[in-house]
């Protein structure tokens, strides 16, 4: 590099000396594996890490427990490559050990189908396995206390008529719902899911051949989860209206209210049900690795949203 500097001789030496120091520092960083000027990592810097994603729902089976390893930066991600096979994975219900087995179709660990999660119970997760070097054994663990069962106080209506004009709604709003407050829970997760995005008329009486359709909104098409049938949010209340933008399609819907423990609430606030890929590992609940092992109780209700027009 040739530098053209209009300055006195001694000043020029100081400037050139400064650039020389920077060049040496960058060379040292490159040699030590810290990468280029912008701190880009090198392939040889890869360090294997392990993550757990597990959520227990009161009254539901224990399933969809993920135990995964990180993959090298030059490798394409896939669940089949990331799953940790052959691990000894257990969940303890108080002092009762519940062994988990790997489902080769979903790459998740699950307990026997007759096991149901209990309310107000301490559950402890433990996974033991060998790392890729086949000599180092690692143990990951986590703990959660399940909340008491949440229940509807004012459940959603069985049928809802989508308004012709959402800017002119009747008062009071007919979509008010409420549920029981749960001790120790400050934030509740609300979700709606369209259970059939294709069919509409077959749920009418008498049935018709009419198909379902998307509720189009100008501000949604660029969202990353545009085609995802679930919409969710978190709120610190036990009584709220279900706003019309909670629905993505017409037809049959399932509305859910979750009372999450602090671990799952922290995960949801950051990822918005996985929509945001960033997660602060300091807010995780796994010892020996990263990730979350949490729990929640849930209340659900099915409703049908009629079209605002054919």
Image: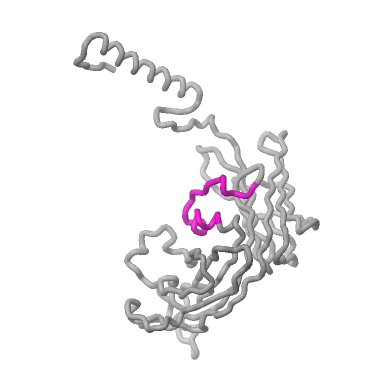
Q: Position of residue 227 (x, y in %)?
A: 44, 64
Residue visible at 50% across and 70% down in the picture: 192
Lateral position of residue 247 relative to residue 267, left or right: left
Q: Where is residue 141 in the image (x, y as percent from the top left)?
A: 69, 48
Residue 105 in sight: no
Classify residue 181 by image quadrant.
Answer: bottom right
Provide the residue span drawn in magenta.
266-286
| Residue 89 painted magenta | no
Location of the C terminus by quadrant is: bottom left
Location of the N terminus by quadrant is: top left
Residue visible at 26% across and 13% down in the picture: 11
Q: Position of residue 128 (x, y in %)?
A: 73, 44
Pick out the residue farthest to the bottom: 206
Residue visible at 47% across and 66% down in the picture: 231
Lateral position of residue 133 relative to residue 170, left or right: right
| Residue 269 painted magenta | yes
């Amino acid at each position: 590099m040739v530098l053209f500097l209009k300055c006195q001789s001694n000043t020029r030496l100081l400037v050139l000396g400064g650039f020389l120091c920077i060049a040496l520092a960058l060379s040292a960083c490159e040699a030590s594996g810290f990468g280029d000027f912008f701190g880009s990592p090198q392939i040889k810097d890869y360090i294997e890490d392990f993550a757990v994603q597990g959520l227990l729902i009161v009254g539901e089976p224990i399933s969809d427990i993920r135990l995964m390893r990180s993959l090298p930066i030059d490798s394409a991600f896939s669940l089949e490559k990331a799953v940790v096979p052959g691990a000894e994975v257990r969940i303890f219900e108080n002092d009762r050990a519940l062994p988990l087995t790997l489902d080769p179709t979903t790459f998740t660990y699950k307990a026997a189908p007759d096991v149901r999660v209990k309310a107000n119970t301490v559950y402890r997760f433990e996974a033991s396995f060998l790392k890729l070097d086949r000599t180092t054994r690692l143990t990951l663990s986590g703990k959660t206390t399940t909340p008491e069962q949440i229940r509807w106080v004012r459940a959603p209506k069985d049928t809802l008529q989508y308004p012709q004009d959402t800017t002119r709604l009747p008062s009071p709003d007919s979509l008010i719902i409420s549920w029981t407050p749960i001790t120790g829970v400050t934030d509740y997760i609300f979700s709606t899911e369209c259970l059939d995005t294709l069919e509409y008329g077959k749920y009418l009486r008498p049935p018709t051949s009419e198909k379902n359709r998307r509720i189009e909104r100008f501000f949604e098409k660029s969202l990353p989860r545009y085609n995802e049938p679930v919409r969710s949010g978190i709120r610190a209340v036990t009584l709220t209206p279900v706003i019309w933008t909670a629905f993505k399609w017409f037809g049959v819907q399932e509305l859910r209210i979750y009372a999450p423990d602090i671990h799952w609430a922290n995960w949801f606030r950051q990822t918005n049900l996985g929509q945001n890929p960033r997660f602060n590992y300091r807010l995780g609940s796994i010892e020996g690795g990263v990730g979350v092992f949490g729990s929640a109780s849930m209340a659900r209700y099915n409703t049908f949203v009629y079209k605002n027009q054919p």
